[in-house]
Image (cartoon, rainbow, N blue to C red):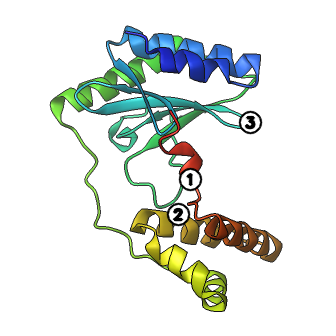
Amino acid sequence: MMDPRVDAYLEKVDADWKRECLIALREILLSCGLKEDVKWGAPVYSLNGNVAGIREFKEHVALWFFDGAMLSDPHKVLIASAESTQAMRQWKFKRSDNLPFETIREYVAEAARNMEQGVRTPMKGPRPLVIPDELAALLDSDPQLRATFEGFGLGRRRELAEYLSEAKRPETRSARVEKIRQLLIDKRGLNDKYRNNC
């Protein structure tokens, strides 16, 4: 059954090609018997648990699989969004791509079967929170920023620390420190805009 919140999400998509791609992916996911919902600000499809989701990004559209690490991936199209990602995998589609409908349907069907059969990615223990030197210096420079940071849950603190750690160039790291400073002043986490906005 189609969720009207997904229609609202699709109406806000900024490019026709992205909207058309998302609509096609939606039709495939629904045709596989998955239940449509909106979580984390984007369409999510489930069957006794989250199976897949779709989302637009600046340069691409993504179909992600919550337990994508367990998919056979015969066409080698799935990627982890970060080195630390354990289970989730995504398939990116760009403007020039033609959607391989049958192949997508095969991946979705395998993911749904895995969910029904209880096939899950074995999870490692929680990653330690590693504070980069620049973030430590920022927190040491302002007790209010430190209090805000320490008031966040572990996930939000980790998002900020890893966001900074992933930057390689000094100018990128400096820009990210300033972004983190503003987020802490505003008492917002890095990905708050994706949480509970639908």
For label 1, count other residues whose C-alpha is less than 10 Å away and answer few (under 14), some (14-19) or many (20+).
few
The disc placed on residue 59 is: 3
Judged by depth in the image, the label closer to the viewer, 2 or 3, is 2
Q: Residue at x 71, y 74 (%)?
A: 177
Looking at the rendered structure, the kind of residue marked 2 is Glu
- Tell me which numbered mark, 3 or 1, is placed earlier along the sequence: 3
Residues under labels 3 and 1: Cα distance?
19 Å
Looking at the rendered structure, the kind of residue marked 3 is Glu
Regarding mark 3 in the picture, which secondary structure is present there?
A: loop
* Residue hosting label 1: 191
Regarding mark 1 in the picture, which secondary structure is present there?
A: loop
Looking at the rendered structure, the kind of residue marked 1 is Asn
Percent x, y of residue 173: 74, 73
For the question of whether residue 141 can be seen, the reply is: yes
Residues under labels 2 and 3: Cα distance?
22 Å
Question: CB atoms at circles 2 and 3 under 8 Å apart?
Answer: no
